[in-house]
Image (cartoon, grey):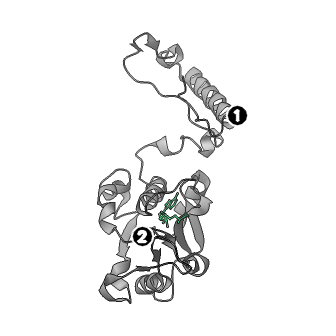
Amino acid sequence: MRVDVFTQVPHAFGWLTEQKPLATVLGTELELRLFNYRDTTPLRAGQVDDDPYGGGSGMVLRVDVVDAALAGAYGDEPPARVIALTPQGRQLDQGLVEELAAEPALAILSSRFEGFDARIVDHLCTDAVSIGPYVLSGGELPAMVLLDAVARRLPGALSDESGEVESFSQALDGGIEYPHYTRPPEFRGWSVPEVLLSGNHALIDEWRRDQSRRRSEGAAGERGGGLVGAR
Ligand SMILES: C[S@@+](CC[C@H](N)C(=O)[O-])C[C@H]1O[C@@H](n2cnc3c(N)ncnc32)[C@H](O)[C@@H]1O
């Protein structure tokens, strides 16, 4: 698939492109292009935002600037999904990640400061997506969150079935994953559950399913309170 990110800070993505599993699929299953609004702005001196009508603090990303960026990248044939990243959008979850990972192409628009001129979201985008009910300073981290989550779902991103049996996956009926342990088998009196040391894979599978079910039920009853880890 091809993912195009529109941003004022393209160099922010350098770190992500070196990280697995995204780095594994980059150049094969994933083509990533970074577009800087400043490169195509029709305004002078690289201007991309402006004061809000009606007054107030903060700058607003201009609709003509985003339109020029999209026209520069696509002419009049944008991809089927043009996504504005905004805390006001549909909240990202694994279902939406799977949906987006199945698309051949995505355009992801980020903003900074006060955000988008509303006409960008209303007329130039097909989707508005939030990574959670809190406000970050810019869309670069949300774009990286979305990119990483989508890249994990592309063929060959993960070397084994680890992407199939994970929290929120169909394999676990959308629930959360069972706990993992590694060496040492005992630390400060905290022991690894014996069944995991038994070598009996049928029993281990059963125990894991049961743990996943219990944790998921617990999580459903404790929404907002954290899923696991409370002592
Ligand atoms: C400071 S925020 C603007 C917040 C906006 N004034 C509001 O109150 O909804 C600047 C930009 O960061 C990005 N952003 C911040 N929080 C986000 C979130 N939770 N999900 C997705 N994007 C977010 C968006 O691109 C947003 O336009």
Q: Is residue 207 above or below residue 66?
A: above
Residue behind mark 1: 221
Crowd band around label 1 with a 10 angstrom C-alpha radius: few (<14), some (14–19), many (20+): few
Tell me the element at label 2. strand
Q: Is mark 1 within 8 Å of ligand 1?
A: no
Vertically, is 28 above or below 202? below
Say few, some or many: other residues with alpha carbon within 10 Å of mark 2 (under 14 / 14 to 19 / 20 or more): many
Nearer the camera: disc 1 or disc 2: 1
118 sits to left or right of 64: right
Q: Residue at x 48, y 58 (%)?
A: 146
Of 186 and 145, which appears nearest the observer? 145
Q: Nearer the viewer, residue 211 or 59?
A: 59
Amino acid type at image mark 2: Val
Amino acid type of disc 1? Gly
Classify residue 53 as left or right of residue 181: right
Residue 7 lies left or right of residue 230; in this view the side is: left
Q: Residue at x 69, y 32 (%)?
A: 217
**Is 142 placed left or right of 18 in the picture?**
right
Give whichever of 230, 93 is nearer the camera.
230
* Res 163 visible: yes
According to the picture, the residue beneath numbered tag 2 turns out to be 5
Please, is residue 126 above or below residue 179 in the view? Answer: below
